[in-house]
Image: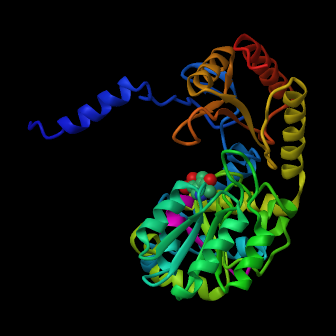
Amino acid sequence: MSNNLEYLEKQVEQLKKDGVYRTLPINEGPCDNRVSLDGKEVVNLSSNNYLGLATDKKVMEAAKQAINDYGAGTGSVRTIVGNQLLLEQLEELLAEFKREEAVTVFQSGLNCNIGAIQAIVNKGDLIVSDELNHASIIDGVRLSRADKAIYKHSDMDDLERILKEKRDDYSNVLIITDGVFSMDGDLAKLPKMVELAKKYNCLTYVDDAHGSGVLGENGRGTVDHFNLHGQVDFIIGTLSKAIGVIGGYVASKKVVKEWLLHRGRPILFSTALPPAAIGATLKSVELLMKSTKYTDNLWENAKYFKAKLDKLGFDIGKSETPITPVMVGKDALTMEFSKKLLAEGVFVSGIVFPTVPKNKGRLRCMISAAHTKKDLDFAVEKIEKVGRELNII
Ligand SMILES: *Cc1c(COP(=O)(O)O)cnc(C)c1O
């Protein structure tokens, strides 16, 4: 053995010295309202399974049926023999759900951003991106050959300043934003962004990972919430969060799909999603389209939980979605809060630098339709108890 890996040993050592080395918690069962984490049952306030569909019996049965009909794997990329009928059916249903002309499914939300962004812009184009956009957008921007400019978070004046200054220097200009920002739960200012895009002749790209299944009619997403159908060029969604399975997609005009099927690298060079995932996803979307009970339960739970924390005197930020940050401040205090809650039976991640600015630490409570009132009452009781111990309230 050579000593060639010494540089990694040093880097890992440094993580330990900095107190940021992590071991992964082990979830011994399904992702549900309560999870068995490292042998202990805890209330789960840390998943993106907004609607509880990850463990819905009908969804699980659909996955099994898809395996029976289509096998365990797809055997190739979509452009060869991996494009199973089930996937075509899913794309059709998603297009109907999103009320857009066409949908192109990718293997994950991350892989969708990485694949789509580099396919739709090129040298001589400019990407204008919100400073708080998701890591997968940042990676997609890096992989593209376009120039980039960053505007201050949700600051439409700053966006306009950049467009005024730079629009004429480029052929295409693509404005990219998250629909819902995952750390604070705030919404992008889409109506204003669309107006600016029209004024300056730009393309728009909205990553609605945390908005799909949550906002709009039956969870159709942020674009539906703002009634902007047909006015956003690229709408990205994940099938991994509210939908409860895995995958990402672009909802768009037909021509975008035609192009992505030729130049979306994950479609050309990575094996298509397995039938179980596609079958489960089809069922999830069907259930969502049939009934508002999933989104109704989610919002009822979120309002119930937020009202309780607010009344106790916690600072719960400016979220407009079920994402509920509990502002703590100091990074070390935030991690201590999270650790103590786990000992009390509540799993909620502490979010600290570099995910958010230094000493703007917060607990990020993710509310789901799967939670019972009992789960939420238990969590609130423990958050209050530890909050008092740590002098946060
Ligand atoms: C979670 C997330 C993704 C990644 O989605 P996966 O399907 O988990 O890969 C992409 N974009 C945003 C904004 C997200 O929040």
Residue at screen point 52% across, 78% down: 126
Measured from the top left, where is residue 117 in percent x and y?
Answer: 52, 72
Quarter residue 253 falls in? bottom right
Number of marks present in the image shown? 0
Measured from the top left, where is residue 377 in percent x and y?
Answer: 85, 24
Residue 321 sits above or below residue 154 on the image: above
The magenta-colored residue range is 100-114
Residue 166 sits above or below residue 190 on the image: below
Q: Is residue 260 left or right of residue 378?
A: left
Can residue 74 be seen by looking at this rendering?
A: no
Residue at screen point 31% across, 32% down: 12
Residue at screen point 18% across, 35% down: 6
Quadrant in which the C terminus is drawn? top right
Measured from the top left, where is residue 303 in percent x and y?
Answer: 89, 40
Task: Decide which of 307, 248 is in the foreground and name it.
Answer: 307
Can residue 110 be seen by looking at this rendering?
A: yes
Q: Is residue 303 left or right of residue 281?
A: right
Q: Is residue 35 left or right of residue 378?
A: left
Task: Decide which of 41, 14 is in the foreground and name it.
Answer: 14
